[in-house]
Image: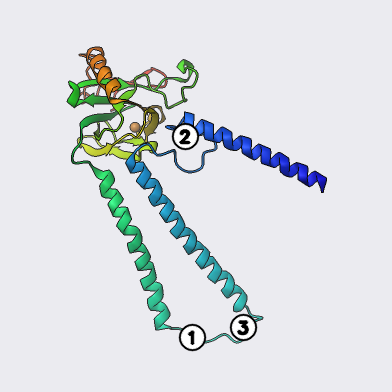
Amino acid sequence: MAIFKKLAAAAAIITATLGTAVALSGRLLAGQPQPGQIGFQPAASPTMERIQSFHDLLLWIITLIVIFVLGLLVYVMWRYSEKRNPTPSKTTHNTVIEVIWTVVPVIILVAIAVPSFKLLYYADRVEDAEMTLKAIGRQWYWSYEYPDHGDFTFDAYMVADEDLEAGQPRLLQTDTAVVLPVDTRIRILVTASDVLHSFAMPSMGLKLDAVPGRVNETWVQINSEGTYYGQCSEICGTGHSYMPIMIKAVSKEAFAKWVEQAKEEFAGVDEPADVADPAAPVRLAATGEELGGND
Ligand SMILES: [Cu+2]
């Protein structure tokens, strides 16, 4: 018996250590996926908070349904087996039961639809945005525009593996961060210049198609300062996995300072690749290699 006690004590220590490690790393690296992570990244916006609680509600509903159906199946297998029920009943219809098993699922679906549509419209757009960010998906990087702050623009390329510094996540770090203020309602406009892309930031509950010739709109309000990572989520070509999105959320004051700096830094800097010119070479961010234009 003593050996079991020792094993139990060791297990408790390991569990406690792992728990602390996970909690610590979760706090340090909130805006990116964790090794062995189960579930969502910590919510960084009101939209994501609502998505998580809606997910939790659905998890309850689906769990109860699964348990109920599994219970019925097991009971029927036991109660109506050949041994216990040698002469089966010839019943083929039961109006009451049929009405119940039609109406109850309808009620459940309506109960799900109401909060679902509420959330859909909440996440859709914000009427009183305080500023606008425009993200343009390109093969294979993102360009950003700040129309309310002097309309400067810049491109953000992924940092290649060999250029990563300590602590920078692989395939997620970009050379230029998208700096945004916290506690601000930010309208996000998303489009693309070549093929379909998708602007996705899991911790903020953002995922919006970037469609050439069309501008899609969503919004975000970032809860706290930090660096958040996302990726293009539409298979868009060979460089699809090499066009991450990196948002640095800072205080409003720090953002105002950054804007002044950025206006100078990005003034007249490389005009975005000419959309109308299909022969323009595109740069593959991962290798820096130049590829021919789309044929
Ligand atoms: Cu893409």
How many other residues sit within 10 Å of disc 1, few (<14), some (14-19) or many (≥20)?
few
Identified by mark 3, the residue type is Asn
Which comes before the other along the chain, label 2 or label 1? 2
Q: Is residue 18 left or right of residue 230?
A: right
Q: Are marks 2 and 3 in contact (CB under 8 Å)?
A: no
Given residues 295 and 220, the one toward you in this image is: 220
Q: Position of residue 34 (x, y in %)?
A: 50, 34
> Which SS class for mark 1?
loop
> Which of the 4 image quarters holds residue 57?
bottom left
Tag 3 residue:
85
Viewer-nearest of labels 2 and 3?
Answer: 2
How many other residues sit within 10 Å of disc 3, few (<14), some (14-19) or many (≥20)?
few
How many other residues sit within 10 Å of disc 2, few (<14), some (14-19) or many (≥20)?
many
Q: Which mark is residue 91?
A: 1
Given residues 111 and 257, the one toward you in this image is: 257
Residue at coordinates 38% horizontally, 51% vertically from top-left? 54
Q: CA distance from mark 2 to mark 1?
A: 54 Å
Residue at coordinates 53% horizontally, 35% vertically from top-left? 23
Which comes before the other along the chain, label 1 or label 3? 3
Please indicate, yes or no, whether residue 9 appears anywhere in the rendered image. yes
Which comes before the other along the chain, label 2 or label 3? 2
> Which of the 4 image quarters holds residue 140?
top left
Task: Name the image quarter holding the C terminus.
Answer: top left
Ligand 1 resides in the quarter of the picture at top left
Q: Are marks 1 and 3 in contact (CB under 8 Å)?
A: no
Tag 2 residue:
33
Identified by mark 2, the residue type is Pro
In the image, residue 237 sits, relative to residue 70, either above or below, namely above
Identified by mark 1, the residue type is Thr
